[in-house]
Image (tube, rainbow, N blue to C red):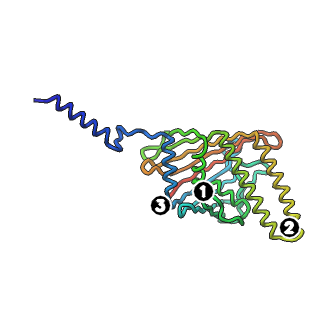
Amino acid sequence: MFNYRNARVMLLILSLILLCTPGCGLVQKAQTPEEIFSLALSGLAGKEKLSFEGQAGLRRENNGVFENQFKFAGKLEDHNRLTLQTRLPGVVNSGGTQMSTTSVLPTGQPGGFSASFQRKKGQWMALSNQQEPLRGALSRYNPISQLENIDRMNKTIKSEYGGGRRTQILRIELNPEDAKTWAMTQLDAEMSAMREEYMHKASAIGGVNQTKLEQELERVWEQGESTMDKMMEPASVQTVYHLTVDRKTSLPLRLSSESQISYQDMNNKKSTEALVTDVNFGEYQ
């Protein structure tokens, strides 16, 4: 004869087992987008070695045509040492006198160039002060540094569809004020690096010519800094990232971004530029 009491007891026991079993897909609490991002950043921070490949380009006025395109690759070793290598396809269009959201990287070297960085107290520092002009701008394309900076800023994180069973995709939009402050910080750092690099070259000349060259470089640098400040003060910046995360390992697989700056040039003409990047992470160790 069927015993309903025993059946109810067995169902209760099974329910308790399901509730107490770690990792059960039926009862496991879904992770929030913020938790997914935090896990991805923590996983990245714990890696001794990794590699990545990416590309970047500048788009003006939403016309779909990219300028200043180049590819880059990077390797992290010993947890805190990073080498970035550019892979430049050809001559870069400087874009005339218009302000650019990213420094124009030189293409004099057929195979591009590399720069090394060391992470010290949470900041990535160039290992050499005697670099070729604008080589220091490569630090902008360090995806590890980007994710670390994103973590410190005000932002909105949402899950996006299309990730599939293996991956999750996060849409990360920075607070406009934070995005603008970060853009200004990067531009200021790159201009300062340019000044130091050119001054170093001028010091190698010596004599009267050195003094004249240093004075001229200082004048040009101050003029450029003043122009940039005037253009950026009323500018607006919108920056959106898309981070693809491996569901199993919680490690980042891809990081793409678009940072759009709307400003008025020196002729009071409204302009829009967008720096677009796309990075794919490779081997983790």
Specify whether 143 is left or right of 198.
left
When the figure is inspected, residue 102 is found, relative to residue 12, above or below; the finding is below
* Precedes in sequence: disc 2 or disc 3: 2
When the figure is inspected, residue 45 is found, relative to residue 7, above or below; the finding is below
- Asked which quadrant contains residue 80, the reply is bottom right
Q: Which residue is mark 2?
A: 210
Check disc 2 and give the amino acid type: Gln
Give the CA distance from mark 2 to mark 3.
49 Å
For disc 3, the neighbor class at 10 Å (few under 14, some 14 to 19, many from 20) is few
Q: Nearer the viewer, residue 38 or 243?
A: 38
| Residue 76 position in % (x across, y down) | 55, 61
- Asked which quadrant contains residue 192, the reply is bottom right
Residue depicted at x 60% and y 53%: 145
Specify whether 217 is left or right of 133.
right
Residues marked 2 and 3 touching at CB (< 8 Å) = no
| Residue 230 position in % (x across, y down) | 80, 44
Q: Nearer the viewer, residue 272 or 198?
A: 198
Q: Which residue is mark 1?
A: 121
* Precedes in sequence: disc 3 or disc 1: 1
